[in-house]
Structure formats: C-alpha cells, structure tokens
Image: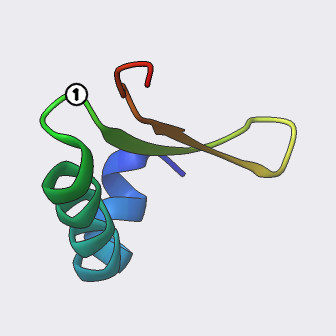
C-alpha cells in the first residue's frame, strides 16, 4: 500500500490532521504515513519549533 492509496482511502482524516498541524506549527510541520514491505506502517510527524 502506497501513501497515495492510504490518502485516497482515508484522506479526510489525514488531511484534517495535516491541516491542524500546519495551523498550529506552520508550513514546516508535516505528517507522512507509509506501509512497510515487511509489514507494519510507519507514521512520522515533523514539527519545527523554535527553542524557547
């Protein structure tokens, strides 16, 4: 299963999560999901926040 397939099957929830990340943390924030050939799924959330 590719990211495109996952997005098309569950696009609304993932799109909302991505939009919320961008609203909270800016354009550098991202969410990616990919299935692994050997089984399982990898989800990665990237948030670029300045140090306090």
Quadrant position of the C terminus in the picture:
top left
Counting from the top left corner in percent of width and height, residue 9 is at 35, 76
Residue at image position (31%, 50%) is 4
Residue at image position (85%, 47%) is 39
Which type of secondary structure does the marked residue at label 1 adopt?
loop
Counting from the top left corner in percent of width and height, residue 2 is at 46, 45
Depicted 11 relative to depicted 3: above or below: below
Residue closest to the eye, 11 or 44: 44
Residue closest to the eye, 45 or 51: 51
44 relative position to 20: left or right: right
Residue closest to the eye, 7 or 29: 29
Counting from the top left corner in percent of width and height, residue 26 is at 15, 39
What residue does disc 1 label? Answer: 28
Number of marks drawn: 1
Outermost residue, right direction?
38
Q: Residues within 10 Å of mark 1 (few under 14, many from 20)?
A: few
Residue at image position (25%, 44%) is 25
Residue closest to the eye, 7 or 25: 25
16 relative position to 27: left or right: right
Query: Which colouring convention does the figure follow?
Result: rainbow
Give the image quarter of residue 8: bottom left
Give the image quarter of residue 12: bottom left
Outermost residue, front direction?
52
Residue at image position (23%, 74%) is 16
């Amino acid at each position: 299963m590719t990211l495109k397939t996952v997005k098309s099957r569950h696009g609304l929830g993932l799109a909302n999560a991505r939009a919320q990340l961008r609203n909270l943390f800016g354009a550098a924030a991202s969410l990616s999901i990919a299935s692994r050939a050997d089984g399982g799924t990898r989800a990665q959330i990237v948030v670029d926040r300045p140090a306090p």
